[in-house]
Structures are given as structure tokens and as C-alpha cells.
Image (cartoon, rainbow, N blue to C red):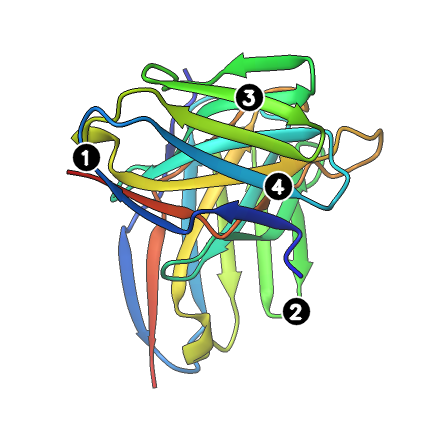
Amino acid sequence: KQEVTQIPAALSVPEGENLVLNCSFTDSAIYNLQWFRQDPGKGLTSLLLIQSSQREQTSGRLNASLDKSSGRSTLYIAASQPGDSATYLCAVSRSSASKIIFGSGTRLSIRP
Amino acid sequence: DADVTQTPRNRITKTGKRIMLECSQTKGHDRMYWYRQDPGLGLRLIYYSFDVKDINKGEISDGYSVSRQAQAKFSLSLESAIPNQTALYFCATSVSRTGSTDTQYFGPGTRLTVL
């Protein structure tokens, strides 16, 4: 059974710092991995999706990496801003036709 | 206008009542999903539908039922609500087109409280 873990559950850093959020999964036979952002009281927004054949994806100040063999993904946020404060969730799927398994998220707070 | 809408956005009800949560999408996607989110537990899949005639149970389907009335509409029902169904419920959509990224698009959520 696939399990997705995100540690720490919460993180607070000062504005301007670069930071890394971690995601680990127990079954390396994944189809893709996604990182989502969730703002309080709102739905999820997809940030980056990495197919199993890819090693990383970049969008602006965000960079997500994938190491299937070790069951790990990281989300790197450069030059953090208060507007980056949100909960970040990672999720994996086994195939294009299978359900997504979510981690419990990391609640990120950027201090001005 | 939002691509994925959910109604109601908030609902308070009593134990034993029947509740229906509705989801509509204008994205033209064939796949739709219902999740619930509880504090510290992430999102868990309740039901999913890959087209109008295809309905599948997720990991926590007990106590819930769904109806895919049309490609654009997917409703979730609680036949007899109980307090531990108090949660934030999300609808999502995705497209199965070859070459698509399988990204799921989420609605804004429905906060349900069962007293």
C-alpha cells in the first residue's frame, strides 16, 4: 500500500530565505508526482507535476525534484515571500487510471 | 468564472439527515473525484468517476454514495449523516486525453459540519 509522508508538518522561515519541502513515498512504482498548494479555506492548486521518467520540473521560483529509487521528492522555493505562506501537499499516482495518494501536507509560514 | 464549482460552500446539519453536495465543471473533463480532508490527514478519496457510466469506490466510500448525472456534474450524498463525517469536501476533475498531464483541478471545497 502506497504511503506518502511529509515532514515537517509545519515550517516557519524569514522572508527571503530559500527553503526545501520534503515528500517521501513507500512504493517507487509511481506514474507521476504532483505538488499542490492550499490556501486556508480554499481548494488545491497544482504547482508542478513530475512524470515518472522525469527528474525535475521548474516553474518560476519553484523547483521540484524526483528520485524514484529513494522514494523522495523535494520542492525548492527560492527567495521566499510572505505570499508563499500556505500548506503544500504532495501526491503520487500509480498509473494514469489510478487514484492519487496525498501526503498530509507541510504548513509553511513566511515571516516578513 | 470558476472552472470547478461546489455547492453549498458551507453546511451545518444534524445526525441522521440526508445531505447532497454538488459539483459542476466547465472544463470538459471526463474524470471527476470526491475527496474529504481532515486535519492532519491530507486528502482521502471517497469516489471517482472516469465517465458517466463508470463509478468507482475510493478508500473511504462507506457511508457515502455518488451520482454522475452528466459529464459536467458529480454529486456526493450522505444518506444518514454522522458526526465523524464532519470534514472539508473537495471535488476535482482531470482529463484522460493521451498526452495530458493528468493534473487534477480542484473546486473550492464544501465545509460540512454534522452535529
Disc 4 sits on a residue from what chain? Answer: B
Q: Are marks 2 and 3 on the same chain?
A: no
Label 1: which secondary element: loop
Residue A60 badge? 2
Give the residue at mark 1: B14
- Is B80 on the left-hand or right-hand side of A26? left
Instruction: Tell me which numbered mark, 3 or 1, is placed earlier along the sequence.
Output: 1
Give the residue type at disc 2: Gly
Q: Residue at 65% x, 48% y: name it.
A: A56
Give the residue type at disc 3: Ser
Distance from Cα at disc 3 to Cα at disc 1: 23 Å
Residue B35 badge? none
Give the residue at mark 4: B24
Mark 3 in CB contact with mark 1 (< 8 angstroms)? no
Q: Residue at 68% x, 24% y: name it.
A: A96
Instruction: Inspect this view and state whether residue B110 appears.
Output: yes
Label 3, residues with CA under 10 Å away: few <14, some 14-19, many ≥20: some
Instruction: Inspect this view and state whether residue B104 appears.
Output: no
Residue B67 badge? 3
Give the residue type at disc 4: Ser
Q: Nearer the viewer, residue A111 or B29?
A: B29
In front: mark 2 or mark 1? 1
In front: mark 2 or mark 4? 4
